[in-house]
Image (tube, helix red, strand yellow):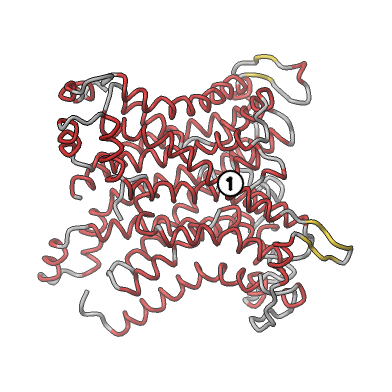
Amino acid sequence: MDTVSPLERVLRGLAITVVILFFMFPIVWIFLMSFQTNETILRVPPSVVFEPTLTNYTALITGKLETAAGTLEIAFMRNLWNSLFLSTASVAVGLLLGVPAAYAFGRLKFRGSEDIAFTLLSFRFAPPLLVLLPLTIYFQKIGLADTYVGLIWVYQLIVLPLILWIVRGYFEDIPADIEYAYRIAGHSWFSTFRKIALPLAGPGIAAAGLLAFIFAWNNFIFALVLASADKQPVTVGALAFVTASGIQYGQVAAGIVLSIAPTFALALYAQRYLVEGLSLGAVKG
Amino acid sequence: MTQTAPAALPRRRFRVGRRALPYLLSLPALLTCIGILIPFFTAVVYSLQRYRLSQPWARKFNWGENYLNFMSDPAFWNTFKVSMSYAILTVGIELLLGLGIALLLQKRTRFNNFVSIMLLMPLMTAPALASLMWKLMTNPGFGILSYFAELLGFEDFRWASDPSTALLTVVIVDVWVYTPFIMILLLAGLRSLPTQPFEAASLDGVPRLFVFWRITLPMLTPFLLTATLFRVIESIQQFDIIYAMTQGGPGDKLTVFQVEAYLNFFQFTNVGRSAALLMILWAITYFLSNVFIKNWLRLREKQRGEA
């Protein structure tokens, strides 16, 4: 590896440049588009020279869309809020349910624990519509149709397996002796869990939470099937927004930028745990 | 399962509720999931019925008829074919590309680490929104990619709205989103390999291509397998990218399993056929995920052993 010929250096450099171009160009282009008006977007040939404007963002944030036909109300901020609320609540519920279960699976090992853990994991791989379509009919019957509670419940389908399997790995990595020593000193099971196991698995729990948040935020199909307009997160809302805004492409681009910024920020923050989380704990980053 | 029971024995000295405790702790999570399992069984029942939302009075069990009809149903075989082509194309390209990029970034330098983090951004983009981004870029009126295509001499290149390039377009979006997934998994794999075989090979002056085929690739196989299976399972169920891009069109060009099932349920209100389609998809993914989980467990044990 140390003797790299000049030709190889050039080829490697070229390959990396092409890779970066392909993966970064769409993000950069949409970002630029979000600061343009329709006039500069529709120019032929396209150009990167333009007078940046914030009107797209102000229109989205104030919820008023100026069109030739008059002022249009847009509910994009509502979608953004729904995304935030649904993801946060789902992760909170997921952690509340998942962390104790992960402890049971990882540390206490009981009859059938492996089978149950695998059943839960297999949810991660089943076609979501298989569950969602009958659920639409059930939810209508029990009054959960188009409610946040119903959505948060369904979101557990992706949040719970993720939390369970990552956190379980962290509990398994804590030497059991530490916990035994604390128990023998006369502490209850619960205080051992709270004072020893939880803090030691803390980073894993945080990572699992952040990843689960990203997955919940990026989810599309659950809300598409189960939520009506006022409960929809940005993933679904943005799609409807394209038709609603008609020809205001700059605003669509601004909407996309606002919708992907939070996950980007979280991913940067939690990048150390991404590999482990994405492979459900199989590969250490 | 017989092996886990003895493993629990030494912990008997735990006092109060030591038997009930693990069940109590996992119960809430289980109940939540059981609530989700009920619809699964309902779907099985639906798939065995003649059930159209538009004709509720005609609802009755027709047992395997929905499945039998598939045999002679060209729409079903189209769905099957499109799903398979999509999965094979996306995962194939992503695997080659991901491996290539991982090899390029293998060395732990500041620049390489920075690039690998940057490349995660597409993976963090919601697939539905990624589709929307590419839709804006391939718009025939102002899309930058339509403009590029024209510069390259493709007159009136219509990307996803043209039946002949629709599959290509969604495959590109999928590759854009998910190649980084394979890349970071393989990069982590490459960097975790022991260095001795490589040092020995370079001391002996073994050609690098030989090293790649005989040392790197075999040692990387568990990672490659995990990444591939993971992606195949997801890709065969892809919905977000395709639905957000064309809703299965133009025509029936992109009606993969989940999109076809969705359209059957909501547009044609044919619940029975929709459920049967999803059952077949489930059978495929169930088989694949069993293979996957076995392989994944082996890798996990190995990694934890080394950690």
Q: Is residue A259 left or right of residue A71?
A: left
- The x and y percentages for residue A123 are 46, 34
* Chain to which the residue tagged by mark 1 belongs: A
Q: Residue at x 51, y 43 (%)?
A: B236
Residue that extends furthest to the front in the rendered view of this protein: A186
Q: Residue at x 44, y 51 (%)?
A: A210
User: Total marks drawn?
Assistant: 1
User: What type is the residue that disc 1 sits on?
Assistant: Phe
The N terminus of chain B, quarter of image:
top left
Residue B217 against residue A10 in the figure, above or below: above
Residue bearing the label numbered 1: A85
Residue B60 against residue B154 in the figure, above or below: above
Residue B201 against residue B53 in the figure, above or below: below
Q: Residue at x 62, y 27 (%)?
A: A134
- The x and y percentages for residue A110 are 27, 24
Asked whether residue B41 appears in the rendered view, the answer is yes
- The x and y percentages for residue A101 are 36, 32
Q: Residue at x 66, y 61 (%)?
A: A255
Asked whether residue B295 appears in the rendered view, the answer is no
Residue B69: quarter of image: top right
